[in-house]
Image (tube, helix red, strand yellow):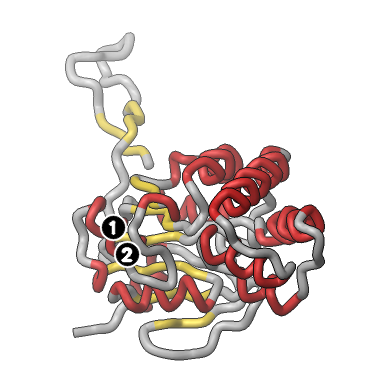
Amino acid sequence: MYECVPVPGCLGPVGHPLPLAPIPVAPIPVAGPQAVLWDMDGTLVDSEKLWDVSLAELARELGGELSAATREAMIGSNMADTLELMFAEVSRVPEPAALDRAHRWLTDRTRELFGDGLPWRPGAADALRAVRAAGLPTALVTSTHRELTEVALRSIGAQHFDVTVCGDEVARTKPAPDPYLRAAALLGVDPAGCVAVEDSPTGTAAAVAAGCTVLVVPCEVPVQPGERRVLRNSLVGVDADLLAALLPTA
């Protein structure tokens, strides 16, 4: 945004003030959410399809195949729960050393896939820019570990977020409220005044448990209507005013 102001003491060739000079003016935050807390996989970027590839390959590496039902159960979960589901699927004993090897294999393969770039979900890039332009504090709240999140942020843009909270930085990750509570604490805001943006039942449960209002845009699996959640087909047209309207009125 720009505001035109006269430049003091500067006159034109016939004694008239010079034309008004545009100077940048910081955006004024709109009335609305205290902060917007964004999920990543399936919400901002269509990374679940890349996880489909790496998880299916890991299952074959472990000597089995990944069923559609088990893959669906993994959506929105953390690494530990995902590997537990994986080992049960391929009938392998989840010994610590084997879990560590699988964790490293999955992280390395997924990092390769993320490194090729992540496709945006419809409307996500514009929604991020609109919220940022409105001056609202923002956080990225993801179950993905920091190592992979940093790769994803090369596509998404770290400049869109004041803070990021990853799955390996909290004692309990989604569906527990811890990631959203941590994000709100880092921003210095009340979770009850925040809007979280999610795509999965697991992430929605976490945000609701933290006290947030949740804008839900389902991606791979349906999310049922419920407490403090508003369902939408896409992020197209989402801006600060729309998010403000989601908050309960006193």
Label 2 sits on a secondary structure element that is: helix
Label 1 sits on a secondary structure element that is: helix
Q: Which residue is mark 2?
A: 178
Where does residue 31 sit, x and y in percent of width and height? 26, 65
Q: Which residue is rendered at x = 61% and y = 56% of the image?
A: 45
The amino acid type found where label 2 is placed reads: Asp
Where does residue 14 sit, x and y in percent of width and height? 30, 12
Asked if labels 1 and 2 touch by Cβ distance under 8 angstroms, the answer is yes
The amino acid type found where label 1 is placed reads: Arg
Residue 58 in the image: above or below residue 89: above
Q: Which residue is rendered at x = 44% and y = 40% of the image?
A: 159
Q: Which residue is rendered at x = 71% and y = 70% of the image?
A: 91
Q: Quadrant of the C terminus?
A: bottom left
Residue 171, visible in the rendered structure: yes
The quadrant in which residue 7 appears is: top left
The quadrant in which residue 170 appears is: bottom left
Q: Which residue is mark 1?
A: 182
